Amino acid sequence: MNRLTAIVLAAGEGKRMRSRQPKVLHPLCGRPLIAYPLRTAQALADRIVLVVGPNADGVVKLAPREARAVVQSERLGSGHAVLQAKPECAEGTILVLPGDMPLLSAETVERLVDHHRKSRAAATVLTAIVAEPQGYGRVLRQGGRVKRIVEDRDASDAEKKIAEINTSVYCFDSKRLWSALGKVRADNDQGEYYLTDVVGILCRAGARVDAIPVVDPAEAMGVNDRKQLAAVAVVQRRRILDRLMEAGVTIIDPASTYIEDTVTIGPDTTIQPQVVIEGQSVIGGECVIGTGCHVSSSRLADRVELKPYCVLTESVVDAAAILGPFCHLRPLSHVGSGAKIGNFVELKKSKIGRGSKVPHLSYVGDSTVGTQVNVGAGTITCNYDGVAKHETKIGDRAFIGTNTSLVAPITIGDGAYIAAGSTVTKDVPPGALAVGRAHQVVKEGWAARKAKTREEHRG
Ligand code: UD1
Ligand code: CA
């Protein structure tokens, strides 16, 4: 059987990123760059060998369990990097995937592998015809057949005009690859062992090298610096939005919508302009996500409405709840079905029961609120005593008057009432009314008496 080993190259220093972290850990639409080729390798290959640089534990951690990692301790070029993978490779077909080309699709790579296997070429290079080939290796052909690849910095002016570039994705017959790699010399501008030289070496030995161009040249976009990362992100974002729109999601303004690759959204949901949805977020169907909302690693059931400018992090919202405008759900908040969370309300680690309302200007933290509860405007759970956090429990159908302070730990029973303006420090039993404020004093005719004393004073 002709086994397929994928070598994923990720040992490059990424100098042009000017970053402390390895280039392939930089995120693109919610996944590190290296996750993209690893996903393709996982879909197609029998074996995966990941080549990393020194101190790249963070990269190795992202590899699937069955992958083998090898360290290229000295960065001597892409050819040298591939050679480090040799002991871990099976005999058969070797697929090389660069770690910095995240737009490459699995379908394109599959087409390359199929072509390579059918044609029985010694090597098959994936190329691209691009309008701006600067910086890329150029594919030199003679009589239509591939002859060699020349790097941009080693190319003559005439060679620089060639629009067909090397994508850095290749298939090799393993035996041919290893023997040719042994002959690669570092006699180039960078003094590196270039994998690209294998093509010329094979051709000179009379072997056949094929090149097939990608259909969509965007797939060949590499990430060497942060400007290229941003350019790649524009394409990737649009792909994510197209996938969602094809699946029935309405996106009013794709240009201002940022949705990560990790997000799923149900049909007939509408995304208003300037929305960010990131992390492992799951949005149900028939939801409305209002302008300016920022949803991070949260789960929304069907028919949830987020009015404009809500911020949700690691929270859960059940069906048909209505949130915002301007509310903030901090981690571990859970809003029950049909509940309403209104303007300038902050929730943290709290459960709001089905049909309950927290409509205005409140902070609810470390709390469990029952069903059909009304939390009046300006209610604050005083959950922190300066040392520890304490819990607030509010029973079903309770009514919390406006401007109430609930000093935790505290329990308000089912159906209890709290008078407006109360500071509640003791538990309130079910069905009771608690009034925790100074009694009002009314002095009849006080203003007139005051005016009289003022006059006497003057006179
Ligand atoms: C490379 C190709 C170029 C091609 C371009 C496509 C070479 C010599 N050139 O150029 O023909 O047009 O990709 O994007 O291969 N790497 C290592 N160890 C090293 C050096 C590189 O693992 O010592 C890895 C990098 O992590 C990267 C890949 O090899 O995944 C390519 O290296 P990079 O420096 O990005 O090469 P380019 O200049 O982009
Ligand atoms: Ca590159």
Image (cartoon, rainbow, N blue to C red):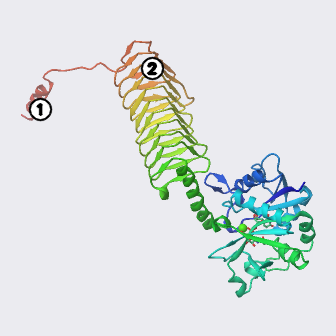
Q: Could you tell me residue 370's position as x and y percent? A: 48, 22
- Which corner quadrant of the figure contains ligand 2? bottom right
Q: How many numbered markers are drawn?
A: 2
Q: Residues within 10 Å of mark 2 (few under 14, many from 20)?
A: some
Image point (46%, 17%), residue name: 426
Q: Could you tell me residue 244's position as x and y percent? A: 55, 50
Which picture quadrant has residue 139?
A: bottom right
Quadrant of the drawing holding the N terminus: bottom right
Residue 222 showing in the rendered view: no
Residue 279 showing in the rendered view: yes
Instruction: Find residue 425 and name its label.
Output: 2
Q: Could you tell me residue 420's position as x and y percent? A: 34, 24
Amino acid, disc 1: Arg
Q: Could you tell me residue 242's position as x and y percent? A: 55, 55
Left or right placement of residue 195 versus residue 310 in this view: right
Which picture quadrant has residue 6?
A: bottom right
Against 187, is 26 above or below?
A: above
Left or right placement of residue 313 versus residue 149 in this view: left
Image point (11%, 25%), residue name: 449
Q: Secondary structure at mark 1?
A: helix
Instruction: Find residue 120 and name its label.
Output: none
Image point (42%, 23%), residue name: 373
Against 104, is 417 above or below?
A: above
Q: CA distance from mark 2 to mark 1?
A: 42 Å
